Image: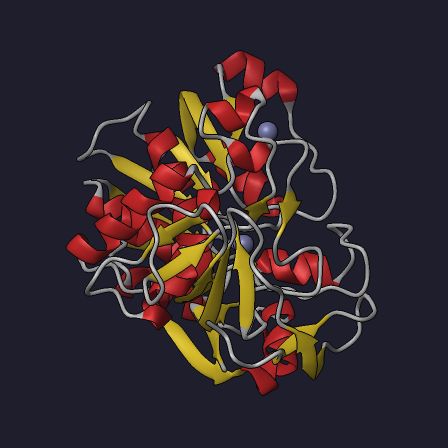
Amino acid sequence: MATKTTMRGATVVEYNKPLVIRDDLPILKPGANQILVKNSCCSLCMSDISGIQGHVGGALPYCPGHEPVGTVAELGEGVRGFAVGDRVGFMPASNTCLDCSECLSGQHRFCSGKTAVGFNGMQGGFTEYCVADPLSTVKIPDGLPDESAAPLLCAGVTAYGALKKVSQFQTGGTLLNIVGSGGVGHLAIMYAKAMGYRVHAFDIANDKLQLAKDSGAEEVFNSMTGDAATFEKTLCTVVVSGAAPAYDLAFKITAKHGKVIAIGAPNGPVAVNILNMILNDLSLIATNQGTKDDLSKSLTLAASAGIKPVYQLRDISQINEGVEDMMKGKVNGRLVYKF
Ligand SMILES: [Zn+2]
Ligand SMILES: [Zn+2]
């Protein structure tokens, strides 16, 4: 049980302004069917940046962070399956209705009634404690340190979810194109390799291409300097980059009857050539995160296949430098913050 009543945490007070670190945030009491988690670390995601920029629409002020890992500090009434001291991580969806078709089919992150930890409210991954929904909470497998697990809570499960979509269309052993080799991209490459795919990776930054190579890509290509006409086409192309030209490239390197699988979220609309899609039987499929089962399986796969995210560990007091680095594309891998 938490003996403290206040905690340290990063808050978004104004959009597009530095976050404010506070030490007087109240530690919430877990209600019925809620878990209080003492966060040990949380990594910074591009969706956090979108939130800080005001694109996600979280009401101000709020506490960001949705890739948290920690230990169970206290259980609310009626929680089953967890014990105080369990090492856990949790996804944002909370307070879901448990009664709509999304909730009943394991897709509760799409429940219209949900709230999202890290995008609303005065607690998140970048606060010392956070109340989590057991439906969105999973145990972290032994052998996966907290700092390695944190980036898997959103980036990892998102990559895994995309690869699950790929597996509906192409079998292991085949070649897969992955566009964008940053924080999520290098994990997509690692998961693709663990699931038996060969990977060609694309990016516009040579340091990211080196990361792609280190993560297991068979070949890497600079899409700024290379000629798209010479790139090998694959049945599926996973787009991790949120830049509009990444989608343009993806349609050029996807074979007839193929699927462009979208994870990278541009902040505005992106033009697509529907005629080209019709003539070549191409589809654009979007995906985000995954079910709780997907998260559990993606963590187990990471532990057994030795998937280790590349990260830099920093103190929460350095969060604003990290936000700036992310916006400038200067982060190699993931930034993980500890308290
Ligand atoms: Zn629901
Ligand atoms: Zn995220």
Residue 118, position in %: x, y? 62, 58
- Which residue occupies 33% across, 23% down? 169
Which of these two is toward me, 64 or 260?
64
Quarter location, residue 178: top left
Residue 272 falls left or right of residue 177: right
- Which residue occupies 80% across, 74% down? 17
Where is 221 relative to 8, above or below? above
Residue 308, position in %: x, y? 27, 64
Which of these two is toward me, 288 or 260?
288
Residue 93, position in %: x, y? 56, 45
* Farthest front residue in view: 77
Residue 203 falls left or right of residue 297: right
Where is 162 relative to 47, above or below? above
- Which residue occupies 58% across, 33% down? 110
Residue 91, position in %: x, y? 49, 50
Q: Quadrant of ligand 2?
A: bottom right
Which of these two is toward me, 269 or 98?
98
Residue 318 falls left or right of residue 11: left
- Which residue occupies 55% across, 30% down? 98
Res 222 seen here: no
* Colour scheme of the picture: secondary structure
